[in-house]
Image (cartoon, rainbow, N blue to C red):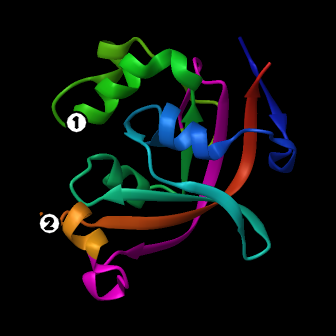
Amino acid sequence: MSFINVDPKTLENNFFKSIDKDWMLITAGNSEKYNTMTASWGGIGILWNKNVSFAFIRDSRYTLEFIDNNDYYTLSFFGGNYRKELTFCGRNSGRNVDKIKETGLTPVFDSEAPYFEEAELVLVCRKLFKQKMAPESFIDKDILEKNYADNDWHEFFVGEIVAALKKA
């Protein structure tokens, strides 16, 4: 099955549900070496007069080095049908296991970053901004205790959505 390129502004997705409840895969790299991870935090919006995504990746995640070393990443949305596969990709590190072999997902390499044939929607994003979260930046200190007790901070990325690929 193939994808068609659509204008991101025409998407009718409920990204609150897609990200929080259905989850997504964040992927970066190339056909020779790439990694993917499950994410349930993030966002889609407008910033600097551009369609953008907001991605948050912990320092401990293997995917971070792929995002750092490449100009593009993808967000792949599957709907609720791939919970088992996304759970596996979130609980296991690509440092230790071949996530693609274990899940049976099919990587596609026809864009600036890999994505997956099984996805319903893919956003191809070009990095615009990166900043490490720091304790002094938090106004609500309860967030620190609940999410960063182990000091495994997130890197915050803003990426311009350069393509939206919808399953044809």
Check residue 123 in the rendering and tell me which mark sits there, or answer none: none
Furthest toward the bottom, the residue is 136
Q: In the image, is residue 131 above or below residue 58?
A: below
Instruction: Check if mark 2's residue and mark 1's residue have beta carbons within 8 Å.
Output: no
Sequence-wise, the earlier of marks 2 and 1 is 1
Q: Is residue 125 magenta?
A: yes
The image quarter containing residue 168 is top right
**Which class describes the residues within 10 Å of circle 1: few (<14), some (14-19), or many (20+)?**
some
- The quadrant of the image that shows the N terminus is top right
Residue 120 seen in this snapshot: yes
User: Is 50 left, or right, of 55 in this rendering?
Assistant: right
**Could you tell me residue 81's position as x and y percent?**
52, 15
Residue ID for mark 1:
93
Secondary element type, mark 1: loop
The residue sitting at 80% across, 39% down in the picture is 12
The image quarter containing residue 112 is top right
Task: Work out whether residue 165 or residue 110 is closer to the camera in this orientation and state it.
Answer: 165
Q: Residue flagged by tag 1: what amino acid is it?
A: Ser
Residue ID for mark 2:
149
